[in-house]
Amino acid sequence: MVGFRTGLQIGVALMAAVLAAVLLPRYLELFTLINATVFVSMGVLALSLGLIWGFGGILCFGQTAFFGLGGYTYAVASINFGDTTWAIPLALALPTAVAAALGYLMFYGRISDVYMGVITLTTTLILFKFANSTAGDQWKIGSSPLGGFNGIPGTPPLNVPFDPGTQLAPDQIFVIAVLCLGLCYAAAKLILRTRFGRVSVAIKENELRAELLGYDVRLHKMALFAVGGFMAGLGGILFANCVFVSPTMFSLSYAGQVIIWVLVGGIGTLAGPVIGCILIQTLTTYAGTLSMIDPNLLLGALFMLAVVAVPKGLLPTATNLLAKLARRGDES
Amino acid sequence: MDYAVVVALQIVSGVATLVIVSLGLAVVFGMMRVINLAHGEFLMLGGYTAILASGQGINRWLSILVLPPLVVGLIGAVVERVLIRRLYGRMVDTMLATWGLSLAFIGGVTMLFGNSVTGISAPFGSFGIGRFHVAGYDMFLVLASVVLSLIVWAVLKLTPAGLIARGTMQNAEMAAALGVSPERVYALTFAAGAALSGLAGGLIAPVSGVLPTMGTAYIAKAFITVITGGAAMLTGTLVASGLLGSVLTVFTFLTTPVFGEVALLVMAIVLLRLLPRGITGRFLRRAL
Amino acid sequence: MTVLLSTDGLRMRFGGVVAVDGVTLAVNEGELRCLIGPNGAGKSTFFKCLTGQYKPTGGRIFWRGRDITALDPFAVARLGVGIKTQVPSLFDGLTAMEGVVLAVRRLHGEAEARRRAVRALERLEVGDLGNRRIGLLAHGQRQLVELAMVVAPEPDLIILDEPTAGMSAEETGRAADLIRELNREHAIVVVEHDMQFIRTIAHTVTVFHQGRVLMEDSAEIVFKDPRVRDVYLGKAVA
């Protein structure tokens, strides 16, 4: 049973995705379209963190670990297979499995939020260092060199399933990316309607009470964390399709940006992080073209501002403001 | 035989480096239960202070040992005033805000000094053990780590300020009732932690070279050391550094530095599964 | 009569302090048992051992004869134990209805869970609060909503830690009626230090003192015993 509100939200999101998929490729230049695909792939990453942090209370500072793992697995596997078809399930399975394993160690150890933040951040940082250090011919998985600092420039774009000869064009990949984002949003909304999703929210509200009602808190958190890893991995695959994989995917500045997107967009919403992601990406891309201000400085300032000044995030603040205005309108 | 001595020295210097780069972070975590995510950038600022000062012709020891803690301590005091103070009691928000600070520092320093490595030559040269050469500066770092630990211990244990700080750490409300302002203690603690981080940056500058993102090379290790150590800041850091520094150095010898860090992380995660509150959460709980 | 829950020489020490020092106790099916004792007698620690929140450092806990000493709280709850903590422990962001539905959702499908949740809320006379957000309720209402969550899955045993904490005299009276009412269908263990309250509900009373069981008997006998009076007035300590 899907409630009216959830149904409406899913409907609007899917409609927006289809509209974007149909209209944007007609009007945008190729370069802008590829950039838009990058934004969308990161939107999926933002959504994954928005889900586990906002609805599961899981403080993951290194969601980029799964994003990068998804991308790298996709690149390495499709170069080895010579076909992207089977690379995709593999590139979804690996980050999911790593998230489950890391989640097992963290949640079954019942470590505190602070420790969890540090462990997850450290994980992505060490993957960053590792990927950076893989320059040279000795670093190969099968026929795919890992490329160190330069990443894997020859990351193959998606091909028609089981037909490696027919690669998809950037506009087709954009369509797929947008639809993936829409579907992830819908899936997240639906998950939150299930018993699993509601128990996850309850755990965020009060871990002890959920436990005393007979729910295995550790298992739920681990499962939700794995779902987050799956989604972030999907984001990584999409990212690999419009740029190519490189250690940057794991970097501290990417890891920080995901947090900023969610904070700015609003913790406890699903659309917020995606909106925050696209807004801030647009802003930093623009700032990058100015080359007067370092994008990191801008991001850092935004980050601090979001924490100190708008702790609830833009979407909830805007919704509250609208509700207030509407109420005032009713009264007058 | 020579080889064994050299390996042993490497392990000792690996442990010492961990102690040096973690101590500032450990003091802030031990006292305020906050992980300062801008810790790496405090190191970086200390490094730049050392480079810039010695570039101005200031005495090398003054540039490495005196100016970095002063400058970064001051920066820490300002940061506490402007940012950290607004977020007391909100640990997660404090972490997030210091992360923003870290990005802003990286960006700001890149704009000011560019994104290239600058260095400062290491004092002492090297000496030979049989066929091998050992850098004299590495041995100086070992000495520095011992002196630093002793200073932190002495300040906490022997001075009135240390007593007040430990009291506040145990029970902030009680300390407040006795007329000690917890805000002042926290402000001083944060500044002291920053100064220690700055000094660490100055100390490692000759070894690592200095660039805006140099902090990232050290924070992973420092974070792991501090949370594996647990709440007792000095004992925890020393024990964890000893354990993890050995693992790091041995794995680095056997494979590559990166696998050394991977081994470090894996070991820390497994250790935290067994001791969720760190080593001093279970053992040596009364220690400093 | 079958023994539902029992402990054998249960011990819990924190560093050098022994909070529970060898407690052996058995609760029968359908029983209403009160655990009393002055502050610091070890009642709350004992409670947390029973619910799995603490892992006892010695002794064992049995449920219908099965050793459950090492179980986590969720596994204890799954045996059919409803647990109410001293400070109300609730989902403040959810509505009362959503909270109680979750309490039974583990055992039943959505429609049945909703029916049972409505019944539980009505049984505690807070049926009208279903759509209110728990975080916005008054203290007494929160206590009742939490009780609704505890009884909704029809547990075999309900453990209550100081259910009257923070209640007015009138509310305490209602709570006593409620506990007697609940006892018709569930075995109940109440941890309390309010002697007045115990007097109005008790059948069998176990008195804790300094981590041990001082005595265990029917309410009338316990309340007449000079040792119990001494413990409460502090003479035995002095």
Image (cartoon, coloured by chain):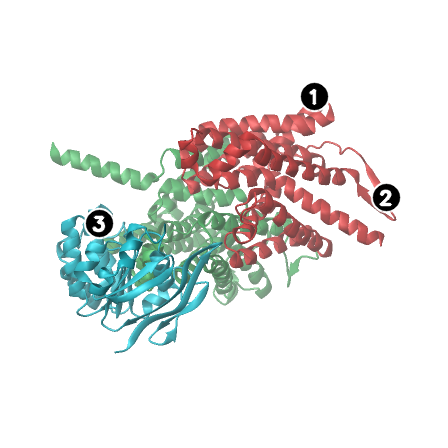
Position of A3 compared to B156: left or right?
A: left
- Look at mark 1 in the image and give the residue it sits on: B56
Q: Which chain is red?
A: B
Position of A166 compared to A263: left or right?
A: right
Q: Is residue B243 above or below residue B192?
A: below
> Please, which chain is the residue tagged with disc 1 on?
B
Q: Nearer the viewer, mark 1 or mark 3?
A: 3
The outermost residue toward the top is B57
Q: Are marks 3 and 2 on the same chain?
A: no
Q: Residue at x 39, y 56 (%)?
A: A180
Can see residue C89? no
Q: Are marks 1 and 2 on the same chain?
A: yes
- Look at mark 3 in the image and give the residue it sits on: C133
> Please, which chain is the residue tagged with disc 3 on?
C
Q: Colour of chain C?
A: cyan
Q: Residue at x 58, y 29 (%)?
A: B72
Q: CA distance from mark 1 to mark 3?
A: 65 Å
Q: Quadrant of the C terminus of chain A?
A: top left
Q: Hey, which quadrant is residue C163 in on the image?
A: bottom left
Q: CA distance from mark 3 to mark 2?
A: 74 Å
